[in-house]
Image: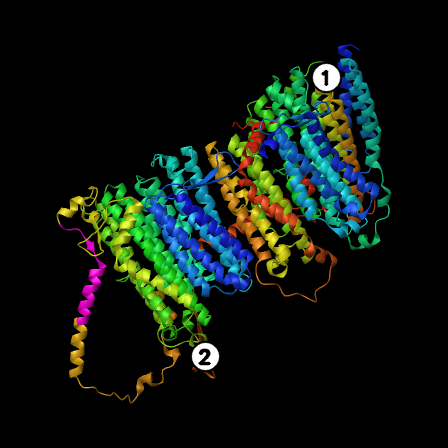
Amino acid sequence: MSSGDASQAVAVLAGLELLTAVLLAWRGPASSPRGPLAVQGFALAGLVAVIGVAEGEPVLWLVALLVAVLKGVVLPTLVVRRPGRTARPDPARAAVARPVVRPAVVRGRSRVPLLLGAAGLVVVAYLAARPVARVVTGATGQALPVGFALVLVGFALLATGRRSQSQLVGFLVLDNGIATTAFLATGGVPLVVELGVSLDVLLVVLVLQVLGSRIDTAFGAGAPGGTDLDQLRELHD
Amino acid sequence: MAAVLASPLTAPLGVALVWVALLGPALCALAVLLLRRRAVVLVADVVASSVVLLCGVALLAGVADGGAAVVTAGGLLRVDPLAGYLLVVVGAVALTATWGGLSPARARSRRGGRYTALVCLFLAAMVLAVVADDLGVTWVAVEGTTITTAFLVGFAGGRRAVEAAWKYVVLASVGVGIAFLGLVLLYAATRAAGDPTLSWVRLVTDRPAVDPTVARMGLLLAALGFATKAGLAPMHAWLPDAHSQAPAPVSGLMSGVLLAVAFGAVLRIQRLDAVLLDGTAVRTLLLVGGLLSLLVAAVLVVTQRDVKRMLAYSSIEHMGLVAVAAAVGGRLALAAMLVHLLVHGLAKASTFVMAGRVLAVERTTTIADVHGLVRSAPRVGIPFLAGAVTLLGLPPSGLFLTEAALVVAGLRAGYGWAMAIVLVLLLVVFVGMGRAVMAMTLGARPEPAGPPEAVAAATEALTAPLVPVVLALTAACLLVMATPLAGTLDSVVAVLGGAP
Amino acid sequence: MSLRLGLLAVLSLALVAACAGGALGTAARQRVSPLLGALVGAAAVWTGALAWSGGTGGLVVGTVLPGVGARYAPDRLGGAFLVLVGAVTVLASVWALDGARGTAASRTAWVAYPLFVLGLLGVMAAADVVAFLLAWEVMAVASAVLVLADHAHRPEVVGAGLWYAGMTQLSFLLVLGGFAVLASAAGGTAWADLARLAPDAGATGLGVGLLLLGFVTKAGAVPVHVWLPRAHPEAPSHVSALMSAAMVKAGVYGVLLVVVRLFPAGPSWWGLVLLVVGSVSAVFGILQAGVAADLKRLLAYSTTENVGLILVAVGAAQVTTARGDVATGHVLLVAALLLTSGHAAAKSVLFLTAGSVLHATGLRDLDRLGGLGRTMPWTCGAFGVAALGAAGLPVTAGFVAEWTLLQALVHAGGPADPRLGLVSALAVTVVALTAGLALMTFTKAFGIAFLGRPRSDGAAAAHEVGRAERVAAALGALAVLGLGLVPGPMATAAVRALGVDGVTAAGTTLAAGVRLGGVAAAPGAVGGAAAGADGLVPVLDPLALSLATLAALVVVAGVVARLRRRAARRAVELGWGCGGARVSPRMQYTATSYAEPLVRIFDAPLGVSRSVATTTADAPYVVRAMSFRQRVRDVFEEHGYRPLLRAAARVGDAGRALHNGSVHRYLAWSFATFVVVLGLAAR
């Protein structure tokens, strides 16, 4: 693969990631985040593979496989998984719980400010990535802003997500953003670290998933993932 | 004795100690999960803490005072004086919290095994975070502490606990995610300089000529991320919720050691900033974060209504002081900061343990609902009062000396305005917390509302051993006077760049 | 002999006493702990005397922090204060043999007591900043524990303890800040290092300003006195005595440390600040004391007044010295030390006897006391002598001190320096007004409590207290008289402690008087030698004065006796009696009614509120009952501290909105911080 081809491929895959991120920001509450997340994960894996080819590092192939499995399959599946425990909320608890309000489901929100915000974040990402892109050699530097944009958009999704699942999605986009930055800027961190990080991310998502189901139980949401996180206001000063 | 302690460890012994410290807690967790005997469940975390403490003391004695650092696992793990010192902090504070938090009732309960196992794993993660030389491994371990404590925070069950756990995991893992982005950028910078590495010691000794902007971005973001776990404002928001909802020994562990361990990572980053760049970026971050933390703590302690939240804000306050001390830098301030970490950990763990017993006896953590503890339950009230007084930095507490040293060092380094702010906020915290603690502990014995109920938890709290708390508070008072340890402390300070 | 031995003795005795207090049983503790306390005091007197006479050596307490060690090595001034504190400790401890009961003799209290004394002594003995701060805070903590001794029985104790703790911490932080400024400017923490700083440099000014503020807080001066009228009444009486006579003096010692020892050449504004603070304290303190009906509260406010006078003396000394009149300045400093010692003696007796009254009657309220002179003659005598001292009347230490102060103030300035003259004239006015009001106050305290008839059952059932209490009170009263009759040695000691030469204690020609050489010296002249020649040197020889007065009295008594023998005795029959035939205790003056004129005159500064409620029957002029309620508030507290505390509470309430529980808000903080840091870093 020539350097030009690699550069093209990187640009396409990075663009795909950004596109899915915006899609996730734009999507309605009813639609499943699984598809875009999976696409994003596979795009990231593809990116790793391309870098592996361009830099001639066979170990990156292995990493690409790991990424594809973890971020393309496992994590998107986990996010939309319906833990069995939440199917039947404890009636005793549900009775004492506050009346169930699910504005995130019921109320439609205008997507325009969100998209405008995302556009602004992309600009910030571009500015922030410039000094890093200067020091990156090879074909990947020009795509670096995408990594930062993913981080920022993911963070914004996380901060504005009203339900546990939306925050999980935001977290994953953020994580994908960091990973993208890592691969684009450095060709991947050392393998030990990469493995550890992957394990950590997997465990965090699992923990959040379990906690999300516990929230549903404790706060008496009818549907899994239906609790508005703004209900979590009992701990305050 | 000192000569023996100061003798450099023979390499194999040192390596063995590192692995014992690392695997000991993990094995304890395994034993709990496999054996499920009540006795094992009861004491496994205490055993794990003791192992860490013993290994920490031995390692610190070996690597300090001119001893060579212990390196193992292909350079991924390395114990220098700072790591040894932090190991001692982890072990000592964890021993206080776990021993003081021994609860036969919990050990008998269905989830007791899970609790003990998670505490042991939490300890293992903290030990790994401390002894890792590779910053990536440190990151993995710090994130590991979030994972292991998530269920501990939510252990009590119920809406509040699960709410605290959710906020904790989301906020902490996002914060630590920022740290990973920072490490990635640091790695990119070193890669561009021709020597891709995240090994702390290599970065400090080789001093690669990194691009200053990228390195600054990386170091700043890494420091900010780890500062989240260290409880520095404005990334601290998880802390009061998590600390107030976790079981008391876990609150003590998180407040006393987890913050210190995370701050240890911040210190490593700060050292890198000083070596690779001019050191102003992280210093400014720490100064601003430290002062903000003090401000937040002062404002929220004044009208605080919950005793465990009050202790949590007190932790934020102390981490703020520690951050300011780190920002001030220099031999005196760094030594004061290190001692502060240890003493605060011991005192905070003791106070949290006692706050847990207050909760068991009074069945509330609302400050306004607790009166006259010293009279009504002296075995709980007096140690609680003593712990709080120690935290307030009154002599003979070691915090008294470290705070005074911080102010002097800060003025000497030209941070007069910052020290003025620190002093004013310290007074506010003192009055706010002092008022609450005095209202809870002093005064006449309250009239019992009804016939005394024989609550098992209250009985257990009233008869629980006081030895660990007394030991920890005594150590918190006397350690600063231990002049023979000055050399050891100096070698730890030297790791952080404090010129002797 | 080396000071080290003395310091070690003090330290080890205090630690032994603290351990004994913790370990012994109740009965043994009651016997042993006070004796050990007295031993600590005696050791301190010995050590202080050594230091005062120029002994050398010291004690170093190391720490694990690099370059941070605490060195205790008192100099002459510190030695003098050690003697003072040690002596007061001996008195208070002896009194406590009988006087400390109940919660005042609890295990906690007897652990804290020797540590309190140790901290006090440490402050005077410190030779560097660390040692000073450490001792200062030990003193603060231990005294707070003692103030809180009775927390379980009286709810107001906890409030008093909180005020005390807060103000004492304020004082500590100010002192810490001040010393930190000085130490960082000087590059060292020893007094010798600090003394090298230029006194007119900006950093020195800032540091000294903070220090003076911190010290006067401890000394209980207005407007940072609010802890004092709370803490002193609530503490056990022997602790009150120690706090008032010794701990408050730690603040005075701090002020002297700064203006005499570290920066003798300081600018005059330091002195002006002290003068203003001292004047306000003196007048405000004695006004509040004058209208107080609680005996211990009265004594506490009187402490504020005395501290005010001491500060006036030190401030005037600083001003006169800075303006070139060194000799008068020296006399003023000696006056400050005389005031200090005189007040320490008088106030320890007053608090101890007030404690005895409290034991005997269970009362602190003057309005319910009365007639104790008959039932408690020892206590009455000691209180009377000490009250004379506190009011500054002759044959007592207080008179000598105030006389010296007035003499020096009157002679300060003069035609050569009218501005200084104006300052000193104002100061003279303040001292005179204070002295007058003090006379009234202590007449009230003594007259209402000990004369007349008992105003309540408690007062009627009073009995003389135990031997130890009487011995302590008598010893203290003797000290008040001794210092008043033979002030020469004390003045000499003060001169030596301060290292000044404006005053000479007359030797053989005058039995024991004080020759204020510097006072008559021309402004600018150093020392009293020049003035001695023209024979205008004011001399104070109270012993001679007293003997002369005594002789005159003998003559007068003789004449009166002769006249009486000549006149015939006539019996008087009172037809109407004018109410005197059926005297009831309720007809007597009470403390409140005695102070009524004062309340009327100083209504506004005292912040008095009173209400009269009349219960009538049938017709408005058939009065069944009347109730009168009067409350004297502290204007500084009302208009200074309360609003501040309310504002703090408001900020706290508003601050609670920061943590409103919304995870989105918390994440937004993190996000914003992340973006800001990213943006700043990528610049």
Which residue position is annotated with label 2?
C625
Task: Give the alpha-carbon distance from disc 1 to disc 2, as whole Å.
Answer: 98 Å
- Identify the residue at horizontal 59%, vertical 20% (top origin): B212
Reply above or below: C623 against B266: below
- What chain does mark 2 sit on? C
Q: Secondary structure at mark 2?
A: strand
Amino acid residing under circle 2? Ala
Question: Is residue B496 covered in magenta?
Answer: no
Q: Is residue C481 left or right of residue B227?
A: left
Asked whether the residues under the numbered discs 1 and 2 touch, taking CB atoms below 8 Å apart as contact, a structural biologist would say no
What are the residue bounds of the magenta stretch? C535-554
Q: Residues within 10 Å of mark 2 (few under 14, many from 20)?
A: few
Please, which chain is the residue tagged with disc 1 on? A
- Helix or strand or loop: what does disc 1 sit on? loop
Majority secondary structure of magenta residues: helix
Please, what is the three-letter code of the amino acid marked with disc 1?
A: Thr
Asked whether residue C670 is in view, the answer is no
Query: What x and y, as percent, mark residue B30?
Result: 80, 38
Would residue A198 be found to the left or right of residue C174 on screen?
right
Which residue is label 1 attached to? A140
Comparing B204 with A134, the one in front is: B204
Name the disc covering residue C317, or none. Answer: none
Can you say which quadrant of the picture contains the N terminus of chain B? top right
Q: Residue furthest left?
A: C534
